[in-house]
Amino acid sequence: MGFLRRCLAWGLVIGIAIALSGCDFSQFKTKTAQVPQYVDSILSEPKTFNYSQSKESPNVFSLIYEGLTTENGLTGEIEPALAESWEISPDNLKIIFTLRPNLKWSDEQPLTVDDVVFTYQEIYLNDAIPTDIRDVLRVGKSSALPKVSKVDERRVEFSIPEPFAPFLRTAGGLNIMPAHALRQFVKTLDAKGKSQFLSTWGVNTDPSKIIVNGPYQLDRYDTNQRVVFRRNPYYWRYSIPGQAKGNIERIIWKIVESPDTALLQFRSGGLDSVSVRASTFSLLKREEQSKNFTIYEGGPDFGTTFVFFNLNRGRRNNKSLVNPIKSRWFNNVKFRQAIAYAIDRQRILNNNYQGLGLLQNSPISVQSPYYLSPEAGLKVYNHDPQKAKQLLKAAGFTYNNKSQLLDADGNRVRFTLMGPTGPTASTLGAQIKQDLVKIGIKVDYTPIDFNTLGNKLDNSLDWDCALMGITGSIEPNSGANVWSVEGGLHMFNQKPVPPNEPIQGFIVSDWEKEIADLYIAGAQELDETQRKAIYAKTQQITQEYLPFIYLINPLSLAAVRNDFEGIQYTALGGVTWNIHDLREVRD
């Protein structure tokens, strides 16, 4: 659900490795051996404990917070959460949510309608609080934001100026935050005139100070080692008979340096689950019975992986953000199409993913009812180097006697491809480099750490080409901040947001504007047949103009020890979407 559960933002589908010290889990486990617990791993440290400021996935928030509604991890259907029910007005312009009675925060304070109004009015809808969450709440061409008001002690009303198809999923699915703990920071300014809230609940915060409403609360965070969660006794499900069947008292996320480290720890018994990569599938499959675990397959992953060029033609301080020579290449659609034809995605799928996945062709997840398949008319770029060369020649490029590609002015075509550190990204980068040299292009692949990568894409805007991934969703409008020209994830032609320096000569292409307008229209349309037609058009445009060159959609696989009951693994929900129903039954 994008921000609604999984946080669209910078969720990398590609592994990120971070150098860190070792972690002796055995001592910690001995102390808690009698406590039902679930031990997992993450590849990077948390960046923040402030939900509104989060831009990465995975993150802690699916365990520690909930919204008015939640998403069923099996079906994707919207279900009650903090709100026990809702009523939509006949004109579809209002939703009144009724909160469950006697809700509490983890510090025993009452969770009320005032918290809901505070969360939206003073955080998500507050221009003084920069957050990408606001992008998915915008309605229509005017980008109007909903109004949120208290009806009575248990009811809260959301209203919008025009129909908005994802209204319920969007309005209900965002996490509610505690007014009594955070309001003072929102209203207080720091020395630079910014709200103190922006620096509140960073990763250096004492976990006991972080007030939550989800099934778990933060217990401890040991930098470079682990994040520990403990069961939140005041979570609403635990007070309703039959709502929660689970017994997991503690969740431990070990911070590991690489997927290979996670695999070793899983095989030695130090982890209760591990993501299964194509390269490790055969090994784990052989050990499935002897080591008492099950490999679950959840269908194609909801995320996307892609290569994309910096199409920003703007300037800062009279200097072009992108080398003008390269910018002319990147902004030539035939050039981008040639790159797409040159990349041998089937070889990537066969070699890197052992065939465990699909070729990816769309920004919309395969499981979404709005996905347009190639059979239904979506353009695809199957590997065809000769077609790539023809397109380049048609665009004015030529070859020298060394088969090197030159532009019309005789400049050799060479650019830098950057991607996150980690084995998966490095392997992909190496193969893309090999494929492009076959059509005469020299690629310099540069793996960089996540923070540096994010800074280049978000702030400096000084880069050529990147390899990235973001999480997906059933609802296309969850990607509105990718396709809106003003969106925080419109990364191929990013418009800087304050306090970053403005740029001069920012240009929006006609096709780019058309996609943005169609996303607005799709969100306005309530007829499902018409909505599907609108989003089909967006997918056709993205595949024609290729702001993103999509690569592979791997199968979502996880190995989980047979010491747990209640596992309902899916690509959408993962292992722990129903953590409240999971039970440890190990001997």
Image (cartoon, helix red, strand yellow):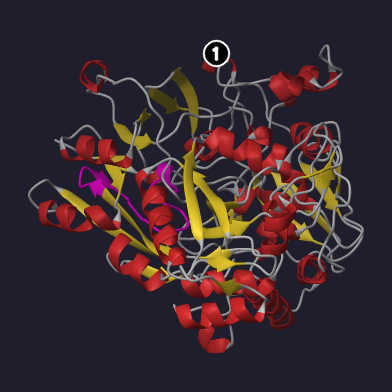
Q: Is residue 581 left or right of residue 87?
A: left
Give the residue at mark 1. Answer: 206
Q: From what the image shows, is residue 538 above or below residue 291? A: below
How many numbered marks does the figure carry? 1
Q: Position of residue 218 (x, y in %)?
A: 49, 24
In-front residue for pair 430/204: 430
Quadrant in the rendering for residue 313: bottom right
Q: Position of residue 216 (x, y in %)?
A: 48, 31
Quadrant in the rendering for residue 552: bottom left
- Quarter that holds the N terminus: bottom right
Q: Position of residue 177 (x, y in %)?
A: 68, 31
Q: From what the image shows, is residue 376 above or below residue 19? A: below
Q: From what the image shows, is residue 246 above or below residue 220? A: below
Q: Secondary structure at mark 1?
A: loop
Question: What residue appears at the point 25 percent right and 55 percent down from the top-left corner?
Answer: 279
Q: From what the image shows, is residue 294 above or below residue 226? A: below
Q: Position of residue 270 (x, y in %)?
A: 22, 32
Question: What residue appears at the point 89 percent right and 62 percent down from the top-left corner?
Answer: 141
Question: What residue appears at the point 47 percent right and 57 percent down from the top-left corner?
Answer: 572
Count neighbours of disc 1 (C-alpha within 10 A) and say few if under 14, some if 14 to 19, many if 20 or more. few
Majority secondary structure in the magenta region = loop
In-front residue for pair 156/318: 318
Q: Amino acid under label 1?
A: Asp
In-front residue for pair 163/566: 163
Quadrant in the rendering for residue 291: top left
Q: Is residue 321 left or right of residue 365?
A: right
Examine the structure image and report whether residue 523 is included in the region drawn in magenta: no
Is residue 311 something that shows in the picture?
no
In-front residue for pair 143/229: 143
Examine the structure image and report whether residue 572 is included in the region drawn in magenta: yes
Residue at the extreme left of the image, as rendered: 290
Residues drawn in magenta: 560-580
